[in-house]
Amino acid sequence: MAVKTYNLRTQGDLRISPNFTVWEFRCRCGRHDDVRIDSRLVDFLQGVRDALGVPVTINSAHRCAAHNRAVGGASNSFHLQGRAADFTAAGRTPEAMAIAAEGVRAPGIIRYTGRRNFVHIDTRPGRYWATDHSGTIRTVSTFGWRPPAPPPHGQEIIQTLYRVTTQRDPLNVRATPNGSGRVLGQFPRGSLVTADRRSGDWLHVTDGRLTGWASALHLTDAVVQAIDRLVSQRVIDSPHYWRERYRDLDHLDRLLINLSVLTLTPGISAASLEEAIRILVGAGAMDPPGAYWITNHGQVRHLDTLIKRAAGMVAGR
Ligand SMILES: [Zn+2]
């Protein structure tokens, strides 16, 4: 479980995600300093906030037993464990807020309309999505969320950093994904570019100035390349060494090394893994749900997905 107890007096201003602080999750009784917060709940709220693009106001998150009784909460309410939040979003209807909550796949979502207008989300096991219109409760299978539009036909959408790995020459950038496409310009060998989609053996890439199609045969996934480099140079051999090096490196290198540690060390002990994850999360390089998922399962097979996502994060900065 990813619930942590914070101290309101000493940690109230602590920012636990880009848009939320500990203070916002406090029990509204005002009689104690402990604030319980599930990091997964924060992640879902931040996701909702990002999707809506407007400020999200938490009306109730952690509740002590006395306050929970006072507001008529269920005796087993997830609010007691710091695993639930009731919120509104500036200028947005409960319908729109619930759709956003569905978009981030919050396990518990209740959309209140009628006498009350807010959305409740929680991190319960399993899934419970429901509407409550002035006390009339119905479970629903969807609030109307639709997945993003599929990529154009034949093109896979990606978001990855690539290094230009031609033997000697610069890499031609073409107007269309084929060898006869008009040449728009060239990327120097060794330059770093971002690809946003693929068509066959061609990648649609940009270096910020020049954008077009280039042959994937001469582009190497920068993260994979960096990891290979770290393997060959034996840069990483223990999380402790990595932790010492950590402060001197820029964000991208930190990220690569972070992920490499987990990737390069198949026999990594549970303690080392926990330590690596703790530092990763602290650096903002991995989000807690992913980290805790790994911790809980003691497996690293999904790291590939995390690496790809992290590479996209860096490319988008
Ligand atoms: Zn309280």
Image: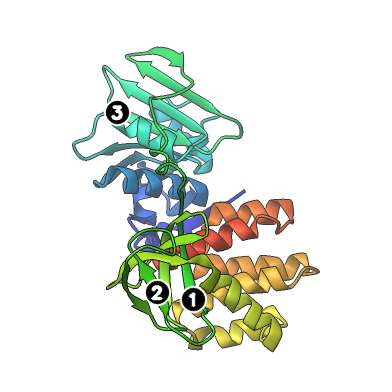
Cβ–Cβ under 8 Å for marks 3 and 2: no
Which residue position holds label 1? Answer: 163
Which amino acid lies under the numbered mark 2 shown in the image of this protein? Answer: Asn
What is the number of the mark on residue 196? none
What kind of element bears circle 3? helix
Which amino acid lies under the numbered mark 1 shown in the image of this protein? Answer: Arg
Distance, label 1 to label 2, CA atoms, is 14 Å
Vertical arrangement, residue 201 with respect to residue 140, above or below:
below
Pick the quarter of the image with the C terminus.
bottom left
Q: Residue furthest right?
A: 267
| Along the line of sight, the residue nearer the viewer: 281 or 73 | 281
Q: Locate residue 9: give its quadrant.
A: bottom left
Q: Position of residue 107 (x, y in %)?
A: 52, 34
Q: Earlier in the sequence, mark 3 or mark 2?
A: 3
Mark 1 close to ligand 1, CB under 8 Å = no
Q: Position of residue 68 (x, y in %)?
A: 44, 32
What is the number of the mark on residue 172? 2
Q: Position of residue 121 (x, y in %)?
A: 44, 35
Q: Earlier in the sequence, mark 1 or mark 2?
A: 1
Q: Position of residue 66 (x, y in %)?
A: 45, 35
Which residue position holds label 3? Answer: 94
Q: Earlier in the sequence, mark 1 or mark 3?
A: 3
Cβ–Cβ under 8 Å for marks 1 and 3: no
What kind of element bears circle 1? strand
Which amino acid lies under the numbered mark 3 shown in the image of this protein? Answer: Pro
Distance, label 1 to label 3, CA atoms, is 45 Å
Mark in front: 1 vs 3: 1
Cβ–Cβ under 8 Å for marks 1 and 2: no
